[in-house]
Image (tube, grey):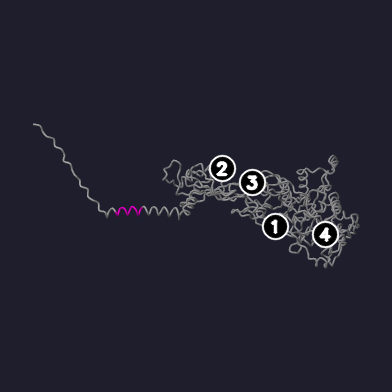
Amino acid sequence: MARLSKRPRSRVVALEKVPDRRLWMIFLILSAGLVGLIGRMAWLQLVQTGPLETRARQLQTQKSQPLGQRRPIVDRNGRLVALDEKRYRLWAHPRYFNFPGDEPTAIRPPRDVAELLAEPLAAPAETLLQAMADQRSGVKLREGLDPETAATIRGLGVSGLDLEAYPQRVYPQGTLFANVVGFLNTERVPQAGLEQSRHSDLQRHEQARSLRRGADGTPLPDALEPGVFYGDDLRLQLTLDSRLQELAVKALADQVKTWKAKKGAAIVMDVRNGELLVMASTPTYDPNRYWEFNPGRFREWSVQDLYEPGSTFKPINLALALQEKVIQPDGRVNDIGQLEIGGWPINNHDRKANGVISFAKVLQVSSNVGMVQAMRQLPDGTYWDWMQRLGIAMRPDTDLPGAVAGQLKTRKAFVTQPIEPATTAFGQGFSLTPLKLVQLHGMLANGGRMVSPHITRGFRSGDALAPSAAPAGQQLLRQSVTSTVLAWMESVVDEGSGQGVKTPGYRIGGKTGTAQKALNGIYLPGAKICSFVATLPIDDPRYVVLVVVDEPQGEHAYGSTVAVPVAKQIIDGLLVIEKIRPSKPEELNKPDLS
């Protein structure tokens, strides 16, 4: 009997009708959300556009602040005197210490890092560990790291170590130019010399850079200010010569030590344009380690300290008398050895009378009485006017920092007190700086023009060197006057106290000086200043050399024994370095009979 298959009964599911109220609620909720979303978008797009764009740019922009670098300083031949070198500070953040290959969340103990840094920093690991102690971040481990050491540390790949770059001012010549260049302190604030006086000029052109980057790090060249990537390569060029400066410093320091003097200075000037080839003084300091020296050494005393020039001023006085035609080139004076002026006695240094002598002889024997007799011919008022015209009481026109004016009695005192013009005749009773005396002797050497002594030639790009300045200066004296005085000064070297600088084949003029030292208007017993000034070559004057030594000890300390030997060494070097042709070549072939 066939069995009938049973078909499953179909199930009819009745759909319940959703209430209209609930549909409306869902619709309203979705609509409110959509309206809120549109409102929020409108708010962001229309109202918050500016702030959001600014925030986005901040996240996309990489800012870099300038390091504050300074321009280099070079001598007249391009030899580096001062420059910025990149140095690094090493910062440690122990909370982030992690080595390459470690799990990202692993934190290394400070001891591991200290042991790793011990070799590149050349420091015991224990010392580095003590520096970090229990600090979690911001520990300065070392300063002044050179780029090679920084690269070694960077190559270790240790997380938690930061290298901060900064410029450090370096002075390759050490003490050689410290007296004129000065230095920057640890905060890079200029403290002395050209670094201070030319501070704004020495700052390199730098701007803060804000560089936008895309999502993949690609630089986006928009919104960059013009010149943001420009960096100049200017260098400040000096007129000083490192070779001659080094020679002068050594000769001066040796002589100051030999005579147990307080200090010494040497200056060499090109009389044609006022360029200084040498500006040396001792004692000095090392600008790379300035904190180890007395701050009193930071000033250049040949520019900032006053002294009475003594007999080295006598040629200047005779030039004034010749200019006013109160004495003649072939004139003579009667040196009786002693005078009394206004109740004050005036003597020659050896208290001897020289009789009737020429003006050349007055300089040779350095006769005080002869000078007073000569300058008596010049009216006191005219004499004072000339001292003013020479700028004795005015600051010299120079780029040397800290230059000061000299001191001169008032016109009333000068013309009413006979002793004033009398002492001025042999270089006392007034004061000036060694720099000012060089300027005045430069005037005698160049035919009567007052040039401005200076040590900078200006800024030049790259390795380019500036040429020498052209001859300049105001004409104050007739050339015939200066030629006569130079001939008299040459006789001092040939026959007088300056024979120590005689050089075969060359015509050199000079004048020694041994002056009493005054302090606050009172002469110090036994204290003196020994000096010597030279001009060369006499037939075509180009250079003035001045050496001043303050308070040498010993009864035989004179300009001829203390200052002349230093000047001789400088002159010998100058003749070679500047390739000065001999004036009398026939003397070079004469046999030495000494």
Asked which secondary structure carries label 3, the reply is loop
Q: Residue at x 58, y 47 (%)?
A: 229
Distance of mark 1 from mark 4, alpha carbons? 28 Å
Asked which secondary structure carries label 2, the reply is helix
Viewer-proximal residue among 230 and 519 = 230
Instruction: Determine if residue 557 is in view.
Output: no
* Residue 319 location (% of width, % of height): 84, 56
The residue where tag 1 is placed is 402
Mark 1 surroundings within 10 Å by alpha-carbon count, few (fewer than 14), some (14 through 19), many (20 or more) = some
32 in the magenta segment: yes
Q: Quadrant of the N terminus?
A: top left
Mark 4 surroundings within 10 Å by alpha-carbon count, few (fewer than 14), some (14 through 19), many (20 or more) = many
**Magenta-highlighted residues:** 24-33
Distance of mark 3 from mark 4, alpha carbons? 51 Å
490 in the magenta segment: no
Magenta segment, principal secondary structure? helix
Q: Closer to us: mark 1 or mark 4?
A: 1
Distance of mark 3 from mark 2, alpha carbons? 24 Å
The residue where tag 2 is placed is 148
First-in-chain label (1 vs 4)? 1
First-in-chain label (1 vs 2)? 2
The residue where tag 3 is placed is 233
The residue where tag 4 is placed is 426
Mark 3 surroundings within 10 Å by alpha-carbon count, few (fewer than 14), some (14 through 19), many (20 or more) = some
324, above or below 9, in the image:
below
What amino acid type should be assigned to the residue bearing mark 1? Gly
What amino acid type should be assigned to the residue bearing mark 4? Phe
| 392 horizontally vs 284: left or right | right
